[in-house]
Image (spheres, rainbow, N blue to C red):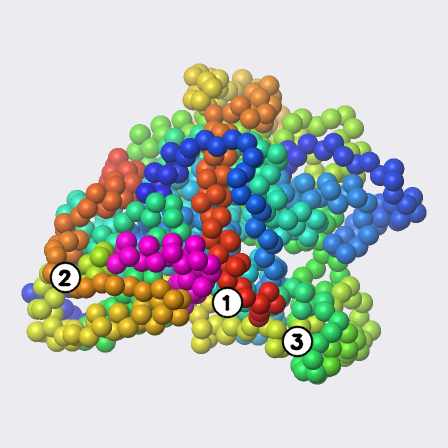
Amino acid sequence: MLSESRTNVPEAKGELQTQEVQKFPIWEVFTKKKESAVHLHAGSLSAPDSELAQCFAREHYGQDQPCVNMWVTRRDFLTADSGENESYELFVQWGAGLRYEHVGEVEACNGVEARDKCKELFCADKKHFTIWSCPNSGITKIDGSTNMIWRETTDQAYRLASGYSKVVRKKWEALRESKAVDDYQSEDLKDTY
Amino acid sequence: MCELDQNLQTPMVELLLSLADDKLFLGHRNSDWTGIAPILEADIAFSSLAQDDIAHASAFYELIGTVNDKNSDQIAFGRTCNEYRCADIVTKSDNFNWANAIARQLYCNTFDYHRLARLSKSNWSPLSALSKRILAEQTIHVDHISTWIQHLGNGNSDSKARLQEALNTFAPYAVMLFEEPEGLQELHDASILQNDSDFYTDWKSTIDVILNSAGVTCTCELTNTKGGRSGKHDEDFVRSLAELQEVFSTDPLAAW
Amino acid sequence: MSASANVEVKVGDCSNEDPQKLAAFEEHVANGGLIEPNDWMPEAYRSLMLRMAEHHANSEIVGALPEGEWIVKAPSLLRKLALTAKVQDEVGHGQMLYEVAQDLGKSRNAMLRDLITGVTKYHNCFNYPCPTWADICMIAWLIDGAAILNQGTLAHGSFGPYIRTMRRINMEEAFHFKHGEDMVLTLMSGTDSQKQMAQEAFDRWWEPSIAFFGPNDRPDELERPAMRWRMKTATNDDLRQKFVNRFAPAAMATGLVINVCTKDDQGNVTSATPDPLLKLDEETGHWGFTQPNWEEFFRVIRGNGPCNKDRLALRRFSYEQGEWVRKAILDGTTTPCKN
């Protein structure tokens, strides 16, 4: 069994016997956390094709928080200059360090034109850092309301910090004075929660 | 209909245990891949599905608890070997072979899909309501595993051969999923569930469609062998159960 | 759990760079500016950032191994779900960090291969054994607690993709840490044997937790490239002190005793005596503590810890077992640009 293999692994040394497998293409994932929100860049992943990229994206970037909609596209589409005459989704990174944010859609005949139109229509007088454009034919759009992403049917509190706050607080208060618990937990709030 | 007749409680618990135990131990075996699967992305995804299965098991143990008034952890962790009702395919060792894990997953996920679809039509509303909810997640599992089957079957000749071998190895265990929980007839007689002769053929045609798109096959035949549903388990199950209970059994009454 | 705090920085040579570009870069970074992958950066910055992200990624996926062993033994449905999700998160962090590193110029495959052949390192704390369930509880509370402190400061660094990843990671680590607290508090509110189990695990993990932040600061710490270029925004000793200030009183409140321990080669505790330096300095607000055994720390880093061989062997075995799968799904992609 796997668990037994885990602890009885033959020790291996020296060079690997196999060649490196060629690099998979990189995919960018955008998630929308609730209906009123816009798609934000969630992260990237490596996958050989669109079907597996979707499977991987759903189960990784779709499971950290509630997610109602997800877009998956190849990274090289986002910066391509060429393209067909069609509609393009536009994403703006407003400053270095920030996440790309979906701003809208334009009709254009290639990537360059799409990004130019984006500057004009959506960035106008606002300072921005970089723009991604993606032809709609190159995006897989997953709608969580018809094709479940975030698991709504079972309790997901076990994988969220908030799922433990009350019970942990109660257990601390059985051991320490409230004031000491406050001091200790104030650290929690600073950066990360 | 929310109240269950006294005399139907035992058969209902048997039925629910067969479902929940299947889910628990499938999740148990699959969660063991977390951190060591062939691709990081696949590792993460497979772990999500394993968590779903454990969460589904948990929901069904809770439902059992409403019938026999026991706590979910006590039901899940606190029985002796012959009191578990899973079919042994769920704990059959995959030997660190991804093809085995995928084959096992295909058989079990498609079976659960059809099982939950049938339970969704039960007359006992707590069962039908829960099954309907879980069925939505089960659909994701079937889609996910189909993608894997297609990628391995249509990958290269090596992967196709490995997948075919795994499908062959697990096929005799897959049919044991169809062993009927004890007292099922009583639930049929009471119209809690419909007697359903198409269960096996529906399942078989689902996997045949998936396997066909991957250029591989499954040859199997229903048998009347008594196994997991009657509490008769093989060596692999016994080893899985020992792991499951290792910490819990040091003090079954303690909170962990 | 994760970390990159103890990456040894040896590079930083910019003598071949265009002085004007370099000066503009350093000014930008010193003023709090951020760097994205397509921006100009000195080669030394790129290679240091790559090493930091790679080391961090390695630590995540090796860190998934000791805890992964305990998924099948978790003693309740909730613990089983939470531990699986935690280890899964670690794999996810590894994946995201390898993507960050990959964009700086080294393929994921090359990084995985360097890891399993011992060319690159991972965080030292994963070379210690986890013999009981209580070890899992202590790791989640102490090591993840230390990781959050560290990564909280890394999230204020200068490299855009890395800090975005840190923010996301910290959100998930918050769950690991809270769940860890819950597990430790459960044991310390439990039976005598649970308390004893917790104390024994605490004795094993206190020292790796305070060593987690890496070696003591050097006199020129603030001048070194990682600090100068704001890859790190806090020094090892400052973070360590902050950790002790928070966790020492909390541990004592649960009834745990903070001991100074000696250990054998397998990582078993051979003696434990209460830390004689453990005292609150009312003036500074800092808790005193005995430093980790640095000699042992460096011995383990060099590959001679209790579990170094096991961790690498399992990672390597997993890599080799998965080879045919990676090959198959790539071969199956008939058109490379298929969407």
**Frontmost residue, B129 versus C239:** B129
Mark in the foreground, 2 or 1: 2
Q: Which amino acid does label 3 sit on?
A: Pro
Q: How crowded is mark 1: few (under 14 residues within 10 Å), some or many (20 or more)?
A: some
Q: Which mark is residue A135?
A: 3
Q: Left or right of C115: which side holds C139? A: left
User: Is the magenta region chiefly helix, strand or loop?
Assistant: helix
Q: Does the magenta stretch include residue C30?
A: no
Q: What residue sits right under mark 1 in the picture? A: A51
Q: Can residue A82 be seen in this view?
A: yes
User: Which is nearer the N-term, disc 3 or disc 1?
Assistant: 1
User: Mark 3 near mark 2, Cβ–Cβ under 8 Å?
Assistant: no
C288 versus B207 height, above or below: above
- In space, the residues marked 2 and 1 are separated at their CA atoms by 36 Å
Name the residue type under label 1. Answer: Glu
Classify residue B219 by image quadrant. Answer: bottom left
